[in-house]
Amino acid sequence: MVPRPRNKANKGLPVNLYFDARRGSYRYRRPTDGKWFQFGADRARAIDAAQQLNLTFLRGGDLVSAVLDEHSITLGGFLDDYESKVLPQRELAQATLDLYKVRFKQIRAALGSMVIDRITIRMVAEFLEPLTARSANQARALLADVFTHAAAKGLCPDNPAASTIPKIEKKQRKRHTVDGLTAIRGKTPLWLQNAIDLALITAQRRGDILDMKFEDARDGFLFVVQNKTAKAADAGWLKIKITPQLQAVLTRCRDDVLSPYLVHRRPERKKKREGKDHWTKVDERFLTRAFKDAREAAGCYKGWKEEELPGFHEIRALSLHLYKRAGKDGQKIAGHASEEMTRNYQRDHADVVWSEVEADLDISGIAG
């Protein structure tokens, strides 16, 4: 089994010995089961002990590795197969794929060099332990799916990730207030103002707003195919009536930049990037950063912790709250499928079932 590359803190240390920067001490990872042992802060003693243990555990390791390399598959090797063959069939949104890339990088760094049928529950649990609840649960779910596919091919006897317990996620982000979002909007460039206004009046998700095109507004309606739900429910195919309120927002999206997208910007460098079909398209991460910068410039939500500060995504919650307060039904415009709605099996045909909704929220109190 080939050990993973050592980071700066562990360079010069024997295999399986690591420096724990948080405790200022060394710890040894037993190669047979991944269990950790604290070796104290004395570097010389820790190295000596690790070398003695390695002589015992790794005796004949070169011969064993030759056999394993020929007949076994590492988790990292199987992840390559999973990414190239399994994920493409699911037609996942780009934002989801970007998130997976982050998790894959973490998984490869911690477990990628290990033979897949030798990874234990303890190893997975120790990998997940230092991660935040949300990150750990995302990585756990992804690993569980990976091991399910590996087990189905006979590469491992069980699913160690599925045997771990999910962490409890406590929602920390608070909701936007009308005054807070108004202050933020006042510190944003025009393209971001348009994105905020569209989010308020249509109650759509960030990715769906950034995908809206001028050609989607036709015959008195704005047609939206929600990335998250279109594959599963009729509610994901929305036909939003263009009310005077929505038309005012659409009109503001027109400017001197020639772009197919409602929300667009002129970048500093005219360059087409991966995942973008037009140089004016705004990607989700850029929008998130720009919104955060505007929020900091506005100075609103003083006294709130960093993890409590609402982002662009929380505009959707405020929109639905305002719809409800105005006595309107926000469920359909949000694209939340009810129990009576059936799956939309006609997604690739001309007779797609569109859910007709009306975007008639008055946002003049925020947008001016």
Image (tube, rainbow, N blue to C red):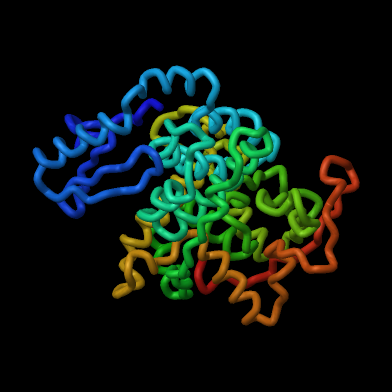
Q: Position of residue 261 (x, y in %)?
A: 60, 42
Give the residue drawn at x 64%, y 75%.
323
Q: Quadrant of the N terminus?
A: top left
Looking at the image, which is closer to me, 86 or 34? Answer: 34
Looking at the image, which is closer to me, 195 or 341? Answer: 341
159 relative to 306, above or below: above
Residue that sits furthest to the right in the current view: 351
Give the residue drawn at x 41%, y 41%.
106
Q: How many marks?
A: 0
Q: Position of residue 77 (x, y in %)?
A: 52, 27
Q: Position of residue 60 (x, y in %)?
A: 35, 22
Q: Quadrant of residue 113?
A: top left
Give the residue drawn at x 46%, y 27%.
271
Q: Position of residue 123 (x, y in %)?
A: 42, 46
Looking at the image, which is closer to me, 120 or 169? Answer: 120
Give the residue drawn at x 53%, y 49%.
161
Left or right: 42 with respect to 30? left
Residue 205 visible in the picture:
yes
63 relative to 108, above or below: above
Looking at the image, which is closer to me, 229 or 184? Answer: 229
Residue 188 visible in the picture:
no
